[in-house]
Image: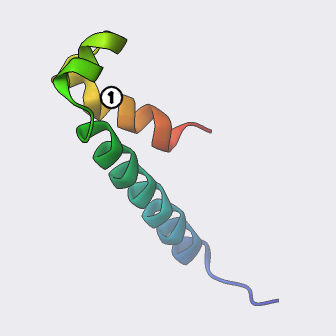
């Protein structure tokens, strides 16, 4: 097993989180305005939705 410095592990973890955020944001952006209205969201709220989905523990 290879031991990595804490700073490198932190960067890898951050990279994974950012990748997950970008994926969640892209999925949210793909929703149509009708779909957003059906679930009661406004387009400006999509960033929050993506952050919650990507960064939940």
Tell me which residue sits at (51%, 71%) in the image: 12
| 3 over 19 or under it: above or below | below
Secondary structure state at the residue bearing disc 1: helix
Work out which quarter of the rendered image holds the N terminus and state it.
bottom right
Q: Nearer the viewer, residue 55 or 3?
A: 55
Q: Is residue 28 left or right of residue 56?
A: left
Q: Pointer 1: what residue?
A: 48
Q: Is residue 29 left or right of residue 22?
A: left
Disc 1: CA contacts within 10 A as few (<14), some (14-19) or many (>=20): few
Q: Which of 10 and 36 is in front in this view?
A: 36
* Quadrant of the rendered image containing residue 25: top left
- Farthest residue in the bottom direction? 2
Q: Find residue 53 and report its horizontal and vertical position in percent.
A: 48, 36
Q: Which of 46 and 31 is in front in this view?
A: 31
Number of numbered tags placed on the structure image: 1
Q: Nearer the viewer, residue 47 or 5?
A: 47
Q: Find residue 48 and report its horizontal and vertical position in percent.
A: 33, 28
| 53 over 45 or under it: above or below | below
Q: Find residue 13 and report its horizontal and vertical position in percent.
A: 54, 63
Tell me which residue sits at (39%, 57%) in the image: 18
Tell me which residue sits at (44%, 66%) in the image: 15
Q: In this view, does 44 lie to the left or right of 53?
A: left
| 26 over 42 or under it: above or below | below
* Quadrant of the rendered image containing residue 47: top left
Work out which quarter of the rendered image holds the C terminus and state it.
top right
- Farthest residue in the right direction? 1
Tell me which residue sits at (25%, 12%) in the image: 37
């Amino acid at each position: 097993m290879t031991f990595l410095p804490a700073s490198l592990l932190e960067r890898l973890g951050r990279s994974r989180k950012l990748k997950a955020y970008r994926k969640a944001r892209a999925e949210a952006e793909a929703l149509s305005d009708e779909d957003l209205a059906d679930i009661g969201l406004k387009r400006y709220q999509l960033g929050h939705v993506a952050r919650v989905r990507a960064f939940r523990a």
